[in-house]
Amino acid sequence: MSGKISLALLASASCLCFAGEALAIDASPTTEPTVIYARQPAQPAPVRTASAERSRMGGGFIEFLFGDLPQGGRYQQQPAYQPQPDYGYGGRRGLLPPMDPQQSMRHEEEEAFDPAQHRLDPRYEKQVVAYHGKESPGTIVIDTPNKFLFLVQGDGKALRYGVGVGRPGFTWSGVKTVSAKKEWPAWTPPPEMLARRPDLPRHMEGGPQNPLGARAMYLGSSLYRIHGSNEPWTIGTNVSSGCIRMRNEDVIDLYGRVNVGARVVVI
């Protein structure tokens, strides 16, 4: 009889032990789901780990009542390392400094305009065209509104070149003569131009960086010239302070065909 009673007490104590452990697990605080926002480091997800210390009370109901367990039961919440995705940077992303937004915009603008990629409109290429005007062969006719320069050839023909002309307020018309010709001319900005652009150099020797380009034909006693340019992408635009600019290859070609004293008609 006593054996049956002991067996019943032992079974009751074991049930209470399992019930106590279940109560300890159920009583542990629930973990809110982790939400990760952009530009915010991810919070490590909590994990449950069993206590490393082993009780000397034998476990069961006695340990549940009198054991020195950590707060919240036998299980504790410990942070765990959560590996983050690489996204293909191989761990080097943190070594890249953030780009300044204004610097990024300037970089995009610089990439958006590349003079080397700018192609001249085919109509501004040198070509032979029909000419039905009254000017004699050897005369230069500059059509300012349409940005063309014609060298009359005779027999109803003319060589046509694309040119850049004066900006609004700097265009002009009239009749001049070629008073001088120079190869790789030097450039001395006039006082009127320096007053508008004090940042310009006072004098620049001829060369590839000179804005007058490879050749220049001076028109009478004026400050105007027909000259080359180191900015060929400006051909076909209103760009100058009154001078007529051409591509370097075109002004070299025209220079070899025109003599000092040639008539120049600007319309």
Image (cartoon, rainbow, N blue to C red):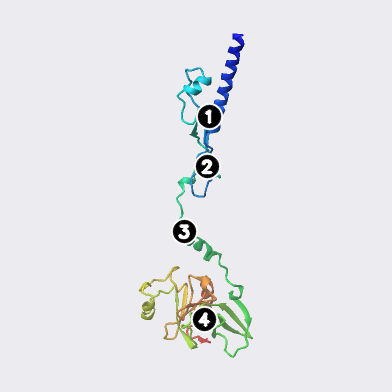
Assign a secondary structure to mark 1.
helix
Question: Dot 4, crowdedness within 10 Å: few (<14), some or many (≥20)?
Answer: some
Could you give the CA–CA distance between mark 4 and mark 2, rounded to whole angstroms? 66 Å
Mark 1 highlights which residue? Answer: 24
Of badges 1 and 2, nearer the viewer stands 1
Could you give the CA–CA distance between mark 3 and mark 2, rounded to whole angstroms? 25 Å
Could you give the CA–CA distance between mark 1 and mark 3, rounded to whole angstroms? 54 Å
| Residue located at (60% from left, 82% from top) | 158
| Residue located at (50% from left, 39% from top) | 44
In the image, what residue type sits under mark 2? Gly
Could you give the CA–CA distance between mark 1 and mark 4, rounded to whole angstroms? 105 Å
Could you give the CA–CA distance between mark 1 and mark 2, rounded to whole angstroms? 43 Å
> Which residue of the protein is positioned furthest toward the front in this rendering?
1
Label 4 or label 2, whichever comes before in sequence order: 2
Label 1 or label 2, whichever comes before in sequence order: 1
Mark 2 highlights which residue? Answer: 90
Mark 4 highlights which residue? Answer: 258
Of badges 3 and 2, nearer the viewer stands 3
Of badges 4 and 2, nearer the viewer stands 2
Up the image or down, 70 lies above or below 180; here it is above
Q: Quadrant of residue 18?
A: top right
Assign a secondary structure to mark 2.
loop
In the image, what residue type sits under mark 1? Ala
In the image, what residue type sits under mark 3? Pro
Q: Position of residue 145 (x, y in %)?
A: 55, 83
Up the image or down, 114 lies above or below 33; here it is below
Label 3 or label 2, whichever comes before in sequence order: 2
| Residue located at (53% from left, 79% from top) | 257
In the image, what residue type sits under mark 4? Val
Up the image or down, 80 lies above or below 34; here it is above
Q: Quadrant of residue 160?
A: bottom right
Mark 3 highlights which residue? Answer: 101
